Amino acid sequence: MSIVNAKEIMVEAAKGKYAIGAFNITDLVQLEGVVDAAVELKSPVIIQTSVKPSKFLGTEVLVAIFRTIAASAPVPICLHLDHCTEVAYCKTCADAGYTNIMIDASKQPYDGNIAQTKEVVDYCHKAGNISVEGELGTVSGVEDQIKVAEDEAQLANPEQAVKFVEATGVDIFAPAIGTAHGVYKTKNPKIDFERLGKINQLLNGGGVKTPLVVHGGTGLPEDYIKKLIEMGGAKFNVSTELKHTLIDAKYEYLSAHRDEYDPGKVDVAVRDAIRKAVSHWIQMLGSAGKA
Ligand SMILES: [Zn+2]
């Protein structure tokens, strides 16, 4: 039905106190599994790729697949480039047809982060209906090529967050609040809910203008997710869980059918496993029926 940018569906989500899932894919089968779940549950959805698979598959190829599938899906879908540290590749993806770009200059000094983020914002806004996500502070763990140790992770300062959003013009904003990439090592990760709430109050207290993103969705307990949505989280990035789902589904199928040489059946198993995992997230985020 509609190819949308991330901001438009997130503004609706923030107003309605639910959130949109941004699901990581590395190939066509996973993309179809994500869309299956969104269509079945009538939910808006964000497909996201990190930089490596985007380059591996080919930017143009990936966008062509996305557009073909999104065109016939009866729900709004966004294609998001996650954690891109290269301004030039952000522009390449914007030109190719991604509808949300995350420039991650969070490892740069504050001024450098502002300069690079603003450059991407200006480019994307001029290029068309593309929203831009910026990050302040750092999320620990590993995401694609970016590795941040937990003790290096710096949480976003609320007042600085407001200045960052104003100076860069980002459409959606990812403040570091203690969530982590990868698998949480503890059952009770230390998340600064109040920090998210404070930033949301400062940015969106007078009406939703800059919806907020929560990174490191994998492994967050459901009650944490609900509380983060309450505090203003309108997009949850889910990457690690889907990587595990992909590998486990393939491994389990192949282990059980070692003498069968039918790639199509492996694909069906993966697509269905991804559909189930994404459906669970859509239910938790409350976006079912919102398309
Ligand atoms: Zn992330």
Image (cartoon, rainbow, N blue to C red):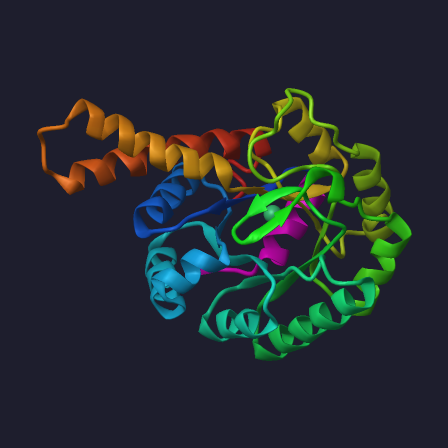
Q: Is residue 124 above or below residue 201?
A: below
Q: Is residue 118 above or below residue 265?
A: below
Image location of residue 207, percent across then percent down: 80, 52
Position of residue 101 in the picture relative to residue 52 (left or right): right
Q: Nearer the viewer, residue 229 or 244?
A: 244
Image location of residue 181, percent across then percent down: 60, 40
The quadrant of the rendering that contains the N terminus is bottom left
Q: Residue at x 64, y 22 (%)?
A: 186
Q: Is residue 288 magenta?
A: no
Image location of residue 157, percent across then percent down: 86, 48
Position of residue 251 in the picture relative to residue 259 (left or right): right
Q: Quadrant of residue 263?
A: top left
Dominant secondary-structure state across the stretch colored magenta = helix
**Magenta part of the protein: which range?**
1-16
Q: Nearer the viewer, residue 248 or 120?
A: 248
Image location of residue 16, percent across then percent down: 67, 40
Q: Does any portion of residue 211 appear in the rendered image?
A: yes
Q: Is residue 9 magenta?
A: yes
Q: Nearer the viewer, residue 167 or 150?
A: 150
Q: Does any portion of residue 169 appear in the rendered image?
A: no
